[in-house]
Image (cartoon, rainbow, N blue to C red):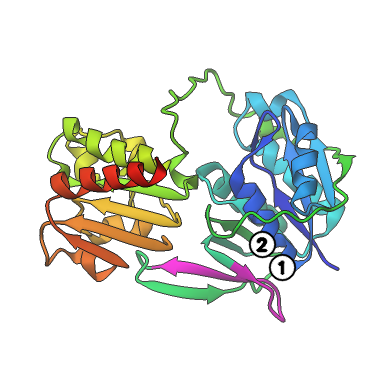
Amino acid sequence: MAEILVYVDHVDGAVRKPTLELLTLARRLGEPVAVALGNGAADTAAALAEHGAVKVLTADAPEFAEYLVVPKVDALQAAYAAVSPAAVLVPSSAEGKEIAARLAVRIGSGIITDAVDLEAGAEGPVATQSAFAASYTTKSRVSKGTPVITVKPNSAPVEAATAAGTVEALSVSFSEKATGTRITARTPRESTGRPELTEAAIVVSGGRGVNGAENFAIIEALADSLGAAVGASRAAVDAGWYPHSNQVGQTGKSVSPQLYIAAGISGAIQHRAGMQTSKTIVAVNKDAEAPIFDLVDYGVVGDLFDVVPALTEEVKSRKG
């Protein structure tokens, strides 16, 4: 069976959920071979084996932490040369897409970014994407070289499937460009206790209708009752009501949760582009003609200041 290279996104050995989703998709195409780099790489093996990795290639060196993405590209290229995979899968984060693009250029292959599904095809993996600001769904495949594909979080379930997970050291020779850009400082992101926006199974977003930074407390309350992440439309971010890091949309972050709740968001195409692949969409807006209602699975025409707190209390009562 063909081997599928999977780039591992982890933090000091703790494997992040998008990588486990990639392993589910990789098993549809062949046998997953995981590539874990940096501090704690060897500690990822147990989790990766539990989710189907037949082999785990690991490498650790100061270059992975001290410089930008090129050392990781060097390592992934070394893994590609060692394995000769049928495809390379990478989580569709900002860093992941840069790593994938650089690798594709180096190996002379085509690349597909932001896939939301993968299936095996007669001529190679077939990827499903949302195109033209999520107005269309397309299926495509790479026609030249080994497919390099980045996959959006929440595109597949995390499924346990125990495999050997044999750990092998990966030999990496760093290129001259690997040390061209050094990281001079890091500032830890302040934790809110909520899930990462792009990885969350549930997202609750507020827009212009929230009408002030102080009113985002009701959006946060609903999110906390559901164990959800908090998002915001561009209008709310531009008004200074919520941080840009939480913006959902074409110029913000793309999310694809199981449940997306939009409160006070009109549904402009810029926002829709960032959330239209959500599995279930619920909107609350007092304007019955708001474009968001053309998209949703469930719509509530009403004042969010009445509906959202009532929904929060209902969630809490059912949990209680």
Q: Is residue 29 left or right of residue 275?
A: right
- The three-letter code of the residue at mark 2 reads Leu
Please say if 74 is above or below 293.
above
Query: Does the image show residue 192?
Result: yes
Residue sitting at x 21%, y 53%: 265
> x and y percent of residue 285 in the render?
16, 56
Q: Quadrant of residue 141?
A: bottom right
Quarter of the image for the C terminus: give it: top left
Q: Is residue 76 left or right of residue 247?
A: right
Q: Which residues are magenta?
A: 118-131
> x and y percent of residue 220 in the render?
30, 36
Quarter of the image for the N terminus: give it: bottom right
What label does residue 25 carry, if any? 2
10 Å crowding of disc 1: few (<14), some (14-19), many (20+): some
Pointer 1 and pointer 2: residues touching (CB < 8 Å)? yes
* Mark 2 element type: helix
Residue sitting at x 81%, y 38%: 58
Please say if 136 is above or below 203.
below
Is 126 one of the magenta-colored residues?
A: yes
> x and y percent of residue 279 in the render?
43, 63
Please say if 132 is above or below 12.
below
- The three-letter code of the residue at mark 1 reads Arg
Q: Is residue 142 left or right of residue 266?
A: right
Residue on which disc 1 sits: 28
* Mark 1 element type: helix
Q: CA distance from mark 1 to mark 2?
A: 5 Å
**Hey, which residue is sitting farthest bottom in the picture?**
122
Q: Quadrant of residue 291?
A: bottom left
